Every structure is written in C-alpha cells, then in structure tokens.
C-alpha cells in the first residue's frame, strides 16, 4: 500500500506540474499580453503594470516567471476576472461547489440506477430483458445532452409545469454562501424560509441531475453488465454452484461484491466524462457552476478566467480520479501491484 | 470446415472480410451499417442534391411547419426557419458538415495516432514511462473539455473545432495502438518471426498490424460517435461552425429562440444528430460483437 | 377492482403495493411542489418582484456607461437626479432639487436642494448626514475635473457627458450654501436641463467617496454603490442576479416590496420560459408574442420608444472610408424584409435617424431606395466591381431597436451577397462587445440608440459628433465639421422653428455621407404577470419601479 500511495503521489505531482505548466503557457498562447492575461488587470495604468511585472518576475527568464506563477497559484491568487474585475479565486469558491453538487448527485443517481440494471442484464444474459436493456442503453448514450436538456425543459417545466427550468434555487430565497454547497448552506442558514428553500432547491436539482446522469447511467449499465458476466464466468462461482448454493445466494453473496469492485475502478474515468456533460447541462439549465462560467468566459474573451478555471476544474477531476483509485485499491488488494490503475 | 483446396491460406478470409461475415449475421447491425453507408453517401453528395441552397432565404415563407402539418407546404418538406431557409436542404447539407467532417477527423487522427502509437510501443525506459504518465493525464481530461480549451486558444470557428477534435483524438488512438501493439508483441507468432530475423518495423508492418486493425477500427467508431457529439456540442455552444453554415449543433442552438413558435427547428437537428450517432454506435457494436465471436471461435 | 380482488389474491397484493407506491410518489412530488403554496411562502412571493433582464450591467454607476441594459438595471433604483422627466408629458420636474432658477441669458442655473434626502446605509458605509451641496459637487466634479481622485476610476470615461461636451459647457459649479448649487455655463444650451434629467446625471455620496479614498479602495464606488434611490444593492452575482432591498428612509417613502430582483437571463427563450413557468414576474424584450397573448394571466405591453436601430460603418477603416461604398450598401439592404423577419412587423422602416414622434422629424427625407442594380453600379464606380469581404458585428443582446441582431445580420449577409460582398458575422458577449467597439476593432456594426431625453439633439450629439468619436461612443468614428457646426447652432437657440431647420440640415448631411444606415424605429415590448400593477416602461430612459406593486 505504501508503494501504491507513493506511485499515486508521484502521478499527482506530475499531473499538477503538467497542468500548471499548461495553464502558464496558456497566458502566452492566448492573444494579448501575457502579463495581463495572467493577472487580468486590463485597466491597469503603466505604474500598476510595472508593479505587476515585478510581482510575476516578467523581466527575468521563463523559469523564474513560471516559478512566480506557481507561487501565486499556491498562495491562492489566480488574478482577477477581465470581465467582472472580481478575484477569480472568490468566484471559483462559489462556482466549483455548485458543479460538484450537481455532478455528485448525478454520479450517485447514475450508479444507483445503472449498476443494478447492468447486473440484471448480465443475469438475464442474451435473453429479452438483456436485449431491451442494451437497446435502451444505446439510445441513452447516443442522445446529445443539450437536446435532451431542452426536451426535458419543454416537457417537465412548460407542458407539465412540475419542475423549474433554470437556476439552482428560486431567487426569492436569500441564502448566504458559506460552503458554496447550496443544500448545506440552506441547512446552515438562519432564514425564516429555510424549509421552503430546501424544497425549492431540491426541485431545482431534479431535472439537471437526471439529464446529466442519463448517459453515464447507460455506461454504468454496460460496465456493470460486463463486470458481472466476467465474474459469473469465474471458477469460484462455479465452485459455489457445485456446493449447491442457490443462484440468488451466489449473486448476492459472491458475484455482486466482486463485480462492484470492477465497476468502481472505472468511476474515476466516468466522473471526468460526467463533468463535461455537466458543463453543457449547466449552460442549458443556467446552473451557476464552473462549466457555464468557463464557457461564458470564452464568449467574453476573459483569458484569465479561462486559464484559472481550467486549472481548477482539471485538478479537481484528477483528484477525484486519484481518490477512486484509492478506494479501488482499498477494496481490491490485487490492484495495488499493478502499474496503472485506470 | 470442409475445404476443397489444399492450401488453406488462399481461401482463408482476411480479418476485415471475416469481420464482414460476422457482421452480416446480425440484422440490427446490418441496418446500422446501411444507415452509416447512407450517411456517408449523403455527406459526399448532399451539396449537389439538396432542393434549395442551404443559405437561400425565402422571405415569403418564414417559419413554415413541416409538410405533414396543415399549414405546411410540400415544396418545403421539413419546413423553414426564421429566415425562410429550407430545413430539409439544411439538414442534408449539415450531414457533410457534422457527420462527414467527423469521419474525416477520425481518419486523420487515426493515421497520426496509429503512427505515433506503434513507434512509441517499440520504445521503452524513461521515455516510455513519461509518455505513459503524459497519456494518463491527457486521457483523464474529458474530450469535450480539452476541445473547448483548444478552441479557446485558437479562437472559435469550424476549422479550429476540427483541429481541436483531431488533437483530442490523437492521444486516444496512440493509447489504443500502443497497448494493442505491446500485447501482440508478447505473443508467440511475433517471437517466431523475430527468430526468423525480422526487424521490429517489419514485424509491425506484416505481422502485428493485420491483427490489430479490427481493434483500431472498432475504436474508431467510438471515436466517431464522440466526434459527432463534440462537433455538435461546440456548434451548439457557439464555438464551432460560423453562422450561415447548417452544422446540426449550430442549427439546434439557433432554433432555441424559435422553440415556442417553431419547435421543429429544435426537434429536427436533434433527431439528425441522434440518428447518426446511433448508426455509428450500431456499427461499432456489431464490430465489437464480431470481434468477440472471432476470438471465441 | 373488487372482482379482481376476490378472484386473485396475489394480484390484489400487487395492486395494493402499486397503489401505495403511487401515493408515496405523489406525496413525494407534492412535497416538492406543494411547498410553493404554504402560507409563509406566499407572503415572501407577494413582497418580491423578479424582473428577468437581458444582460448584466457593466457597472453600477450610470455616469460611466451608455448601454441601456445598465441603465435599466441600475439607474432609477439606486440613484436620484437633481431634476427628472415627468412620466406623462416628458417635461422637466423637480427631484433632488425642489426648484431651480435660470438667468435670462441662460448661462447661470441655480438649484435649491431638498433637505430631507438620506443616502443608503450598507454593510460598508453608514451615512452620518443628509444629502447636501457637497454631494452634487462631488458627483459632477468627478466627471469634469481630470484631477479629481475618482475621475480615473473605472477607466475615466463618461461617454454621455463627453458626447454632449459637458466639460466645455460647464465653466464652473459652485456651492452657494449647503443646499444651493450654481452651474455657470460658457454659453446658453437648450438641452442642458434635459441632459441633467437623464439617467446618467446621478448624484453620488461625497461622504462615501471620502471614506473609500481614506482606505484607498476608490474602485469600490462603482462596484458597491451608495445612492439616494428607492433601493439599495444587497447582492450581485455577475451573470446571474442582482438583489435590491428597499431603502427604508427613502425621501419619497419606503417601497412596499421586501426585495426587487433582477434575474439575468440572456437567452430569449429562457426569459419566456421563466415567464410562462412563473419564475419571473416581468420579462424584458419578450419573444413569441402570440404565445403570451394566448395566456390570460400574462400581459404583453408596448410603449412607443424614441429609438433607432442602425447599421454603422467604421469610417476610419477601408473600404468604409469611401462614401460611395457606404451608399452602395445602403441601397442594397432590403429594410422591409428586415421589418418582417426581425421585428415581426412591429416597427417602422427608418428613413432617417429621427423617429416620427420627434418634433424635429422631417418627412421630406425619404432614405435610400432599395435597388440592387443601383447598389451594384455604385460599388463598381467605387472600385470594387467584384465586391469584397467584410465583417458585421451583431450585438448579442436584445434591445427594443433591434430584437435580434443576429437574424438581421443574416438577412444583410444574404442581401449583400447579391452585390458580391461576402459577410462574416461576428459576435461577442455584450461587455466585451462594447469594449472592443469603443476601441474601433470592428468594420461595421448592427446597433441602435434609445433616446435618453426627448430633445432631438440626443440622437445627434451622442451618436455622431466629433466629441463622441473621441470618447468611443460614436461607433462609426465619423467626424464632420459642418455637421458639428449645425448641431452647435441648433443648441444655442431656443427657437423651435429655427432648430427644426438646423436638424433637417443635419439629417441631409447624414443621408449624403451615410456614416450609418438607419434601419428601423420600433416599439419597446415587455411582458408581465397580470398581478403586477403600475407603469414601469416609459418612452424615454430606463425602467422605473416607483409605482409598481404586486397584488
């Protein structure tokens, strides 16, 4: 386990290095002055620019510049947004939790729905149920998510009027940002309308969560199905059968657990995929997350925001990746020996 | 299998032909394959056979519903948009953009990716380990996100979108090829030709490639369905195809403003994307299925 | 059901289970939905108004902008002016100044301030005194005095004031006593009072300014605003919402609402959806008018607005530095088609810059006739027989004068193709768009102008004078001395007949030089829930919630 941890830390270090390097080079790749791209100070006077240039060591060689950038990043200074002139770290503190909230809810939904269905498909292998499940799953991951989102709004918000169409919570409720996670913030707040706000926030979450979860759920169906089929093919299952255990017992006691371990291995990779889907969904449902903000930053040519937003988002995705690797390793000792988890 | 010829090798079908044989056995896959072939033909000939130009405005025929609606007009089969442009023509033309270009993109990145991948499979040591780490990092970033980054650097536009998707797909093909080649290299037949004195490159060309080509093509179908969705998503977000071009995602996003008065401008492009992705996925599904049968038999 | 239950027991069990599941599902759902109807909630909803705006404000200080979005979302809620337009007849009435006096030569104007006006008390500022002459001096000196501590904050641009040459006009502002201020002008100016009554001429707090200067936080004056208006800023999330709370010591009495919300929804369909689902009470620039008219609980309303939508050329850049090219394009655009496709017929074709309801409107000016052949011949004569490639910048937000610039751009793209010109359509997010425009990065642009006051000068000076070319508000960067001369002559007199003649001449110069092509004069639309009472749309200036209430 120690070697495994060291390997992962090594990978994490390498990744963070690579990502910061990428983000640093973006300031040169983007149009405009690198210093302004890094700091976001588009209205700076020459005097202010001179101070900035000093801070970011822009008179020195490129390595020192990168070093200065790194120290800025690690002290939490990502510059200010070119569009709103607010510190980017403050914006991200509000935005990233909203995205995490949506993605986690969707991930859980996708797993709770997808994995059992996948197991059922495997158990009914090559029967009607299996075929139906596979066909539906194929539709699920072929639907363009932006289209699905629009249809969902049309049906559930407009025609049926059941669920709200946009945002994270009705604007009427005034919830102070403490953690950035809406649900937690509501529970922490002392608003007189706390309970209504909670219900309202939950209602706002349903549509976007389902839309984000659909494609990953179908992938979980396939993953779970494959994993279960593999497990059912194993000799210990045959041994259990030979011992006279009923099919239900075999599935319940032996197969599910082992198949789950295999599914968890892929959660990290699926999560990355899910976050991308969430980015597009955020645009459609006006979800105030980092994905929508990032895409708007592209429209606004807010290079400082793009660069820092990417750094934070991809670091976050990678962190989840590593965490699921750890969970997998904890559940499956064999994995600790292998070189690459994913 | 009874055969008349003495030399079995002559009669033995090539891997691709074998694939096709397995392919034909499943009607669903065959339907998918026909749709796929139809889309390719449409993509090539669409600009020639559309009833109207895709950017021609018919200002007296604004927002006409599809022909089966009571207000529809048979000469505009799928209706018109807010500028009176014929949706049928635009969707057909869009096939060459969204579907056709995604096909080209996949081919280009396949060639580059397989080239780099097989070369890198032959290397080892620090360089290999670095590449491994590097691929791990790149592959952990979702393709659409990476494409958005590249578009942000290059600036919005269709060309830039395509380059971005090529750049996103290359590492994936590198990864697949590299793993496949490495796996093949551990097999006995490779050892046999090595003992015959064949160079690595020769083994690669004559022994390994024929055996991994199906795997790569099956991966290519996955890549293509991702490419279609990515091109459409970037078009939808306004980062892809420029304004008059009838790229499906861009069409869908310009239809949003007409959602209430002309919902078909949203339904139809969405259906077109769905149709092409399903056709592509069916082909891929069939290919993987056939591969599995091939392995088992 | 009974028959089934008797004949088949397990089935009954299943049915019961199903029923139980159904009720629990329904209960679960009503748990989410029913919540909206609980008693507390109704009171919260009844005391809040949600206005769905089409974009974010660029700044919370209207002095520094001209964009209508910013005016709508900030000006009349946060601030007051010395004087204001009366809603009914657009004459000038008292506001922070309870009365004023103009000397016979028109050069000295004295304002007598109210004594009971208090500023907002916010999280980072608690006022210790009421409004007085120092605040008026502070607000205008920020614009006029280049050495003022706050002049350079937010870029140092005051586009509206620069375009009317405020700094040349005002020689000096003096404090006579705590509640009396006198403006001395270099010459009499017939639009001076109108300019002071616009949404731009707001009064800031000098005390707040001093406090910020002490802490060296100057830029916060425009980010965390303090004014005297009926609402104060509680929360702003860029691109998402503005939350205003009532100003409890407002001099005209506290608002009956407990909060005023601006839900920033740039998507047209998004705004309509929110109106239909009741997430918004009022929406700006609604689309799909038939859909709104179908519903009895929604009201679609329109006011005749003083505005013009136009296509402007960057006259500093080739090929549009050539008058003939501009004229050729003016003849190639099918305005009637634009009125049908973009405005759905709810607009008049513009023949000149001035709308029909302006007193200086001149029906003798006919505009450029639509003629492809003539356009083509002009283009050939100007040295571009094969056409060229150009960019059109289409603004990304909906305004009354142009509800859909993108569609308009597409139509013009098709029109110009007929005379051999290839058009690329360019668009940016609104703030970026305006910034890049004022830097002159465009070749041509689809934009428009809503008048800030009824004086016709407001259509000319801010849009096309040499001064506004310097400040970047003149998006065509066109400077014509004869034109400026005519405008100045018109301003120096109060004789309406004479002024009419001068403006006719100005319009002639525009028709001849074509720095821009006027396209349409449109009504301004708005949709609201029927339970919202009061008038918030006016023909001139931004929206005003003063008389608005919710039933």
Image (cartoon, rainbow, N blue to C red):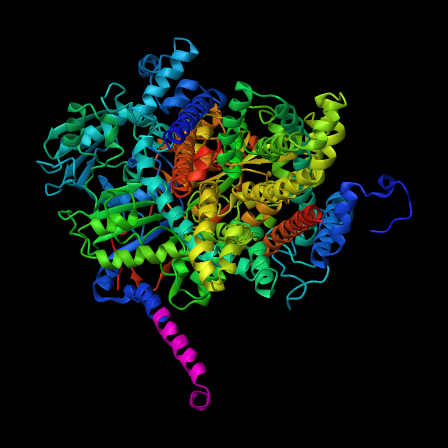
**Quick one: C140 or C363, which is closer to the camera?**
C140
Report how many numbered discs are placed on residues in the image.
0
Q: Is residue C549 magenta?
A: no
In the depicted view, which residue is nearer to us: C505 or C148? C148
Residue C21 in the magenta stretch? The answer is yes
Q: Residue at x 47, y 58 (%)?
A: A152
**Residue B136 position in % (x across, y down):** 50, 31
The image position of residue B289, as x and y in percent, is 66, 50
Left-right relation of B20 to C120: right
Q: Position of residue C283 (x, y in %)?
A: 38, 54
Location of residue C107 with respect to A134 vertically, above or below: above
* Residue farthest top in this picture: A60
Foreground pick, C46 / A279: A279
Which image quarter holds the N terminus of chain C? bottom left
Q: State the extent of the magenta-drawn residues as a range.
A: C1-25
Q: Residue at x 13, y 41 (%)?
A: C118
Residue C355 seen from this side: no
Q: Report x, y in % for residue C79.
A: 23, 41
Q: Which image quarter: residue A53?
A: top left
- Tell whether A127 sits left or right of A56: right
Quadrant of res C166: top left
Q: Which residue ends up furthest to the front in the rendered image?
A: A243
Q: Identify the main secondary structure in magenta.
A: helix
From this viewpoint, is residue A127 visible?
yes
Q: Is residue B182 left or right of residue C364?
A: right
Q: Who's the residue at 39% across and 76% down the image? A: C17
């Amino acid at each position: 386990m120690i070697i495994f941890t060291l390997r992962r830390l090594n990978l994490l270090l390498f990744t963070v290095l690579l990502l910061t390097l990428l983000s640093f080079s973006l300031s040169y790749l983007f149009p405009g002055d690198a210093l302004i791209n890094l700091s976001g100070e588009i209205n700076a006077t020459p005097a202010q620019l001179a101070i900035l240039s000093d801070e970011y060591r822009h008179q020195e060689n490129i390595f020192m510049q990168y070093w200065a950038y790194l120290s800025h990043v690690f002290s939490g200074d990502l510059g200010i947004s070119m569009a709103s002139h607010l510190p980017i770290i403050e914006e991200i503190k509000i935005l990233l939790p909203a995205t995490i909230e949506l993605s986690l809810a969707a991930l859980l939904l996708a797993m709770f729905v997808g994995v059992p269905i996948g197991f059922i498909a495997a158990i009914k292998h090559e029967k009607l149920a299996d075929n139906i499940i596979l066909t539906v799953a194929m539709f699920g991951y072929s639907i363009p998510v932006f289209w699905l989102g629009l249809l969902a709004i049309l049906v559930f918000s407009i025609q049926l009027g059941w669920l709200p169409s946009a945002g994270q919570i009705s604007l009427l409720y005034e919830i102070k940002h403490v953690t950035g996670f809406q649900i937690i913030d509501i529970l922490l707040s002392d608003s007189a309308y706390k309970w209504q706000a909670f219900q309202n926030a939950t209602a706002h979450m349903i549509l976007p969560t389902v839309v984000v979860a659909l494609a990953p759920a179908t992938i979980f169906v396939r993953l779970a199905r494959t994993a279960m089929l593999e497990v059912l093919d194993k000799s210990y299952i045959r041994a259990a059968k030979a011992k006279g255990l009923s099919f239900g017992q075999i599935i319940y006691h032996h197969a599910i657990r082992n198949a789950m371990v295999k599914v968890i291995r892929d959660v990290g990779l699926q999560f990355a995929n899910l976050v991308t889907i969430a980015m597009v969904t955020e645009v459609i449902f006006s979800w105030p997350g980092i994905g929508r903000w990032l895409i708007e930053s592209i429209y606004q040519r807010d290079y400082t925001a793009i660069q820092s937003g990417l750094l934070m988002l991809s670091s976050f995705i990678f962190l989840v990746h590593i965490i699921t690797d750890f969970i997998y390793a904890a559940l499956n000792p064999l994995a600790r020996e292998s070189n690459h988890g994913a | 299998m009874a055969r008349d010829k003495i030399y079995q090798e002559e009669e033995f079908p090539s891997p691709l032909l074998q694939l096709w044989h397995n392919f034909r056995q499943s009607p669903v896959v065959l339907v998918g394959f026909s749709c796929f072939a139809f889309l390719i033909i449409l993509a090539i000939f669409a600009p020639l056979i559309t009833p109207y130009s895709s950017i021609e405005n018919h200002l007296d025929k604004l927002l006409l519903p599809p022909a089966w609606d009571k207000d529809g007009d048979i000469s505009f089969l799928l209706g018109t948009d807010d500028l009176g442009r014929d949706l049928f023509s635009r969707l057909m033309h869009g096939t060459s953009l969204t579907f056709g270009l995604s096909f080209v993109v996949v081919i280009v990145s396949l060639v580059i990716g397989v080239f780099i991948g097989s070369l890198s499979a032959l290397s080892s040591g620090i360089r290999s380990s670095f590449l491994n780490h590097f691929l791990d990092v790149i592959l952990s970033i979702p393709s659409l996100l990476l494409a958005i980054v590249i578009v942000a650097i290059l600036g919005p536009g269709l060309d830039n979108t395509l380059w971005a998707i090529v750049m996103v797909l290359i590492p994936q093909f590198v990864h697949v090829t590299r793993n496949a080649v490495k796996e093949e290299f551990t097999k006995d037949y490779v050892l046999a030709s090595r003992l015959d004195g064949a160079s690595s490159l020769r083994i690669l060309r004559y022994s390994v490639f024929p055996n991994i080509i199906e795997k790569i093509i099956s991966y290519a179908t996955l890549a293509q369905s991702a490419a279609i969705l990515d091109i459409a998503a970037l078009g939808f977000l306004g980062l892809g195809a420029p304004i008059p071009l009838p790229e499906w995602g861009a069409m869908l996003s310009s239809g949003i403003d007409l959602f209430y008065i002309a919902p078909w401008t949203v339904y139809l492009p969405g259906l077109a994307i769905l149709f092409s992705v399903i056709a592509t996925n069916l082909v891929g599904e069939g290919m993987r299925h056939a591969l599995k049968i091939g392995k088992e038999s | 059901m009974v028959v089934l239950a008797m004949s088949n027991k397990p089935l009954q069990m299943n049915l019961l289970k199903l029923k139980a599941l159904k009720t629990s599902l329904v209960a679960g759902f009503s748990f989410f939905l029913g919540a909206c109807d609980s008693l507390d909630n109704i009171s919260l909803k009844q005391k809040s108004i949600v206005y769905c705006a089409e974009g974010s404000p660029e700044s919370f200080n209207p002095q520094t902008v001209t964009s209508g979005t910013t005016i709508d979302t900030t000006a009349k809620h946060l601030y007051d002016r010395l004087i204001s337009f009366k809603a009914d007849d657009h004459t000038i009435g008292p506001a922070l100044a309870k009365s004023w006096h103009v000397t016979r030569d028109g050069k000295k104007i004295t304002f007598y301030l109210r004594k009971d006006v208090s500023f907002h008390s916010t999280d980072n500022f608690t006022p210790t005194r009421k409004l007085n002459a120092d605040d008026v001096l502070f607000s205008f000196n920020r614009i006029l005095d280049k050495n003022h501590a706050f002049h350079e904050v937010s870029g140092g641009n005051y586009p509206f004031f620069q375009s009317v040459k405020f700094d040349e006009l005002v020689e000096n502002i003096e404090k006579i006593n705590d509640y009396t201020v006198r403006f001395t002008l270099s010459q009499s100016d017939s639009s001076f009072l109108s300019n002071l009554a616009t949404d731009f001429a707001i009064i800031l707090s000098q005390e707040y300014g001093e406090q910020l200067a002490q802490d060296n936080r100057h830029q916060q004056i425009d980010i965390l605003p303090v004014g005297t208006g009926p609402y104060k800023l509680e929360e702003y999330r860029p691109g998402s919402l503005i939350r205003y709370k009532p100003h409890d010591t407002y001099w005209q009495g506290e608002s009956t609402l407990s909060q005023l919300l601006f839900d920033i929804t740039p998507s047209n369909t998004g705004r309509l959806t929110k109106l239909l689902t009741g997430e918004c009470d009022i929406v700006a620039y609604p689309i799909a008018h038939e859909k709104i008219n179908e519903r009895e609980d929604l009201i679609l309303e329109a006011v005749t607005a003083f505005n013009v939508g136009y296509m402007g050329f960057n006259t500093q850049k080739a090929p549009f530095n050539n008058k003939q090219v501009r004229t050729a394009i003016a003849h190639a655009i099918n305005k009637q088609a634009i009125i049908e496709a973009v405005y759905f017929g709810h607009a008049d074709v513009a023949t000149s810059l001035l709308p029909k309801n302006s007193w200086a409107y001149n029906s003798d000016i006919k505009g450029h006739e639509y003629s492809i052949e003539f356009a083509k011949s002009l283009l050939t004569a100007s040295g571009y027989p094969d056409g060229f490639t150009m960019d059109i910048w289409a603004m990304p937000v909906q305004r009354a004068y142009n509800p859909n610039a993108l569609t308009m751009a597409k139509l013009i793209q098709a029109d110009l193709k007929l005379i051999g010109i290839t058009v690329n359509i360019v668009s940016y997010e609104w703030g970026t768009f305006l910034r890049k425009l004022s830097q002159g990065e465009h070749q041509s642009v689809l934009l428009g102008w809503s008048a800030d006051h009824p004086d016709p000068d407001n259509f000319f000076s801010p849009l096309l004078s040499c001064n506004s070319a310097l400040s970047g508000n003149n998006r065509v960067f066109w400077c014509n001395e004869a034109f400026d001369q005519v405008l100045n002559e018109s301003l120096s007199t109060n004789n309406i007949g004479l002024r009419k003649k001068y403006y006719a001449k100005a319009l002639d110069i525009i028709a001849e030089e074509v720095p821009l092509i006027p396209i349409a004069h449109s009504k301004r639309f708005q949709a609201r829930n029927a339970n919202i009472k009061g008038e918030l749309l006016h023909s001139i200036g931004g929206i005003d919630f003063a008389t608005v209430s919710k039933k």
